Amino acid sequence: MIERFDGAPVGERRRWSDEFKAQAVAAALEPGVNVSALARRLGISPPQLFGWRKAFLKKQEADIMAGTPTPMPTPMVEIVVGEVTIRVGPDVSEAALRRILRAVRSP
């Protein structure tokens, strides 16, 4: 079963947190990523993710022209262990990641 990023909506009216959008855009900007497949895996429509990505790139370009570069969204690494999906950022230490993996693998 595919899980969503934290901040994904559950109700009828779908609204996404800025953190969810940033994580989705960061994942969509990774080299070789199939954006449509990523969108479906996240439970959003591909045009929605393409729109977020386009808006981010347009804002980044405008900020560069204005001399205030937009920071890139933090990339996330996704690890699937059985039916559990773990998403971590670059700030997670190796020791912390090992503890998380041990916890997920233990019965």
Image (spheres, rainbow, N blue to C red):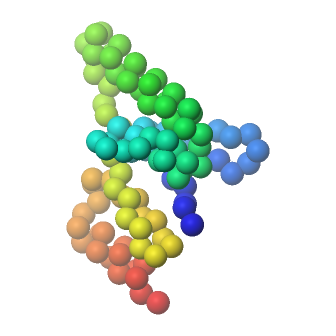
Position of 19 relative to 52 (above/below) = below
| Residue 74 appears in view | no
Foreground of the two, 40 or 21: 40
Would you say 106 lies left or right of 46 here?
A: left
Residue that sits furthest to the bottom in the current view: 107
| Residue 23 appears in view | yes
- Residue at the spot 46% in from the left edge and 23% down from the top edge: 55
Residue 69 drawn at (x, y percent): 28, 21
The number of numbered badges drawn on the structure is 0
Position of 100 relative to 70 (above/below) = below
Quadrant in which residue 73 is drawn: top left
| Quadrant of image for the N terminus | bottom right
- Residue at the spot 31% in from the left edge and 34% down from the top edge: 72
Foreground of the two, 105 or 96: 105
Quadrant in which residue 3 is drawn: bottom right
- Residue at the spot 55% in from the left edge and 48% down from the top edge: 40
Quadrant in which residue 12 is drawn: top right
Position of 18 relative to 43 (above/below) = above
Residue 59 drawn at (x, y percent): 40, 19
Would you say 37 lies left or right of 32 here?
A: right
Position of 74 relative to 1 (above/below) = above
Residue 28 drawn at (x, y percent): 40, 40
Residue 49 drawn at (x, y percent): 51, 36
